[in-house]
Image (tube, helix red, strand yellow):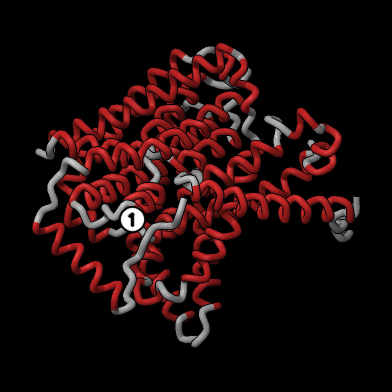
């Protein structure tokens, strides 16, 4: 083999199919995403539906010839889509990190810590217990049930900050104390979720070896400390240098470079690449407040192009026909019940322990229960690591959709019974004044 020989270019047909796939997936994701919004659902529901319609749930069954041509089972062809989807999910997670308000955590950390602790510990414990009881049919043949249990615990305890923020903004609840506490506790949950997902990733890759797990935890600590002590000034310097240009391009490109290199660094340490993207997003958001307007094109491209394509690709792995099996259907219903009960109960108990009222506790539980995009990212990671079967992956994705749809009606009912305080009225007035002079407060990306 001649090592100096050039790598052959991508075959003509493979490139043609890839371009058709991306164009069709994006077109349908935009159309069905907007349709979902018109019916009061998160856009991610419509975007995921694209993959469900074109995947094994429908097209592969009713038109296998067309499905085989448009979405061939060739691994190399699917890897092209996967690579594009991976870029999309890294930028999506980075944007979620950019919108985290560290000042809010400092101001409301004590109350939010109790809510977050309850919303983490209870569903984590129930998820691990549920992992012990799920039927073998949902386990990978060569998989480790212990790894699956730990993974399921993480999947049950995460919240979706983008979904929470979008729901609160749409319902005009972001200025309420409940809204502020839910955002803060959701931020803590997100950070913990990425940490735990990295641990699960390391365990799935290397197995339950005490030394290796300890090394992975050490890497996690080093990443966090390094980001605070070294990454923060480096990111600030890089963005300020890029901002010397009058154009927005250099700032956007620099932010993307930071996210990609940070993701590569954590992936090299056998942690999850999305953890690196999340940390880099927090760094960019905390040091580049004056450059937020210049980063707007990045938000637009990610949310309008990369994220819809990623969710459509994620939907291609969903096989709704698996629910025709009574065992899989029963397991799905049981896991949905565990997910909802665990998050609701945990967040509610945490809220009550923080001296909030009954209805405030219910409202916070409803908000924290929304898993949305974060759960879907977690599901994709589980599938890629070989932790989840197609059946288990389908269940996790459907849990993400169901919990996101549940949040608005429960929030609306609960908040109707919570009186508006003078502090909340003042906060609302301040937010409206900011908006009126054009200084729109940062908002989380739409789910």
Q: Looking at the image, which is closer to me, 103 or 213?
A: 103
**Would you say 233 lies left or right of 446 here?**
left
Tag 1 secondary structure = helix
In the picture of the structure, the residue carrying the numbered disc 1 is: 169
User: Which residue in the rendered view is the most extreme toward the front?
Assistant: 39
Q: Residue at x 40, y 38 (%)?
A: 196
Vertical comparison of 306 with 48: above or below: below
Vertical comparison of 376 with 429: above or below: above
Q: Taking the image as drawn, is residue 248 in sight?
A: yes
Q: Residue at x 25, y 69 (%)?
A: 432
Q: Looking at the image, which is closer to me, 85 or 275?
A: 85
Check disc 1: other Cα within 10 Å, few if <14, some if 14-19, many if 20+: some
Residue 370: quarter of image: top left
Q: Residue at x 42, y 69 (%)?
A: 235
Q: Residue at x 38, y 38 (%)?
A: 158
Q: Looking at the image, which is closer to me, 186 or 213?
A: 186
* Residue 137, horizontal then vertical, whole percent: 59, 15
Q: Looking at the image, which is closer to me, 294 or 281?
A: 294
**Would you say 288 lies left or right of 121 here?**
right
Q: Taking the image as drawn, is residue 222 in sight?
A: no
Q: How many marks?
A: 1
* Residue 44, horizontal then vertical, whole percent: 52, 46
* Residue 206, horizontal then vertical, whole percent: 54, 32
Vertical comparison of 387 with 330: above or below: below
* Residue 54, horizontal then vertical, whole percent: 71, 39
């Amino acid at each position: 083999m001649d090592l100096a020989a050039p790598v052959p270019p991508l075959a003509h047909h493979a490139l043609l199919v890839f371009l058709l796939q991306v164009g069709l997936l994006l077109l349908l994701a935009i159309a069905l995403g907007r349709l979902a919004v018109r019916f009061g659902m998160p856009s991610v529901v419509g975007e995921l539906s694209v993959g469900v319609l074109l995947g094994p749930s429908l097209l592969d069954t009713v038109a296998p010839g067309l499905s085989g041509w448009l979405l061939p089972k060739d691994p190399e062809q699917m890897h092209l889509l996967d690579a594009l989807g991976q870029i999309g999910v890294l930028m999506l997670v980075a944007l979620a990190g950019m919108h985290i308000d560290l000042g809010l955590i400092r101001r409301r950390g004590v109350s939010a810590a109790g809510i977050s602790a309850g919303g983490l510990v209870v569903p984590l414990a129930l998820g691990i217990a549920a992992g012990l009881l799920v039927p073998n049919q949902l386990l990978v043949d060569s998989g480790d049930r212990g790894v699956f249990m730990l993974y399921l615990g993480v999947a049950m305890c995460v919240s979706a900050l983008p979904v929470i923020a979008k729901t609160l903004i749409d319902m005009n609840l972001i200025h309420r104390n409940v809204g502020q506490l839910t955002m803060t506790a959701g931020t803590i949950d997100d950070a913990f979720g990425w940490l735990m997902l990295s641990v699960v990733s390391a365990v799935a890759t290397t197995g339950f070896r005490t030394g290796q797990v300890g090394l992975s935890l050490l890497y996690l600590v080093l990443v966090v400390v390094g980001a605070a002590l070294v990454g923060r000034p480096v990111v600030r310097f890089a963005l300020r240098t890029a901002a010397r240009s009058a154009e927005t391009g250099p700032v956007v490109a620099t932010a993307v470079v930071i996210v990609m290199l940070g993701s590569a660094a954590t992936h090299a340490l056998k942690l999850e690449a999305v953890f690196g993207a999340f940390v880099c997003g927090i760094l960019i958001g905390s040091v580049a407040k004056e450059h937020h307007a210049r980063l707007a094109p990045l938000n637009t491209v990610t949310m309008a192009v990369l994220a819809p394509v990623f969710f459509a690709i994620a939907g291609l792995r969903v096989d709704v026909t698996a629910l025709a099996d009574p065992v899989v259907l029963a397991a799905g219903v049981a896991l949905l019940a565990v997910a909802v009960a665990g998050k609701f109960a945990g967040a509610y108990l945490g809220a009550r322990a923080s001296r909030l009222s009954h209805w405030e506790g219910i409202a916070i539980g409803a908000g924290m229960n929304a898993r949305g995009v974060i759960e879907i990212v977690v599901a994709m990671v589980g599938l890629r690591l070989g932790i989840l079967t197609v059946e288990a992956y389908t269940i996790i994705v459907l849990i993400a959709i169901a919990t996101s749809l549940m949040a608005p009606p429960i929030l609306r009912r609960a908040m109707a019974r919570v009186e508006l305080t003078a502090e909340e009225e003042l906060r609302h007035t301040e937010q409206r004044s900011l908006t009126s002079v054009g200084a729109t407060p940062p908002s989380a990306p739409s789910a």
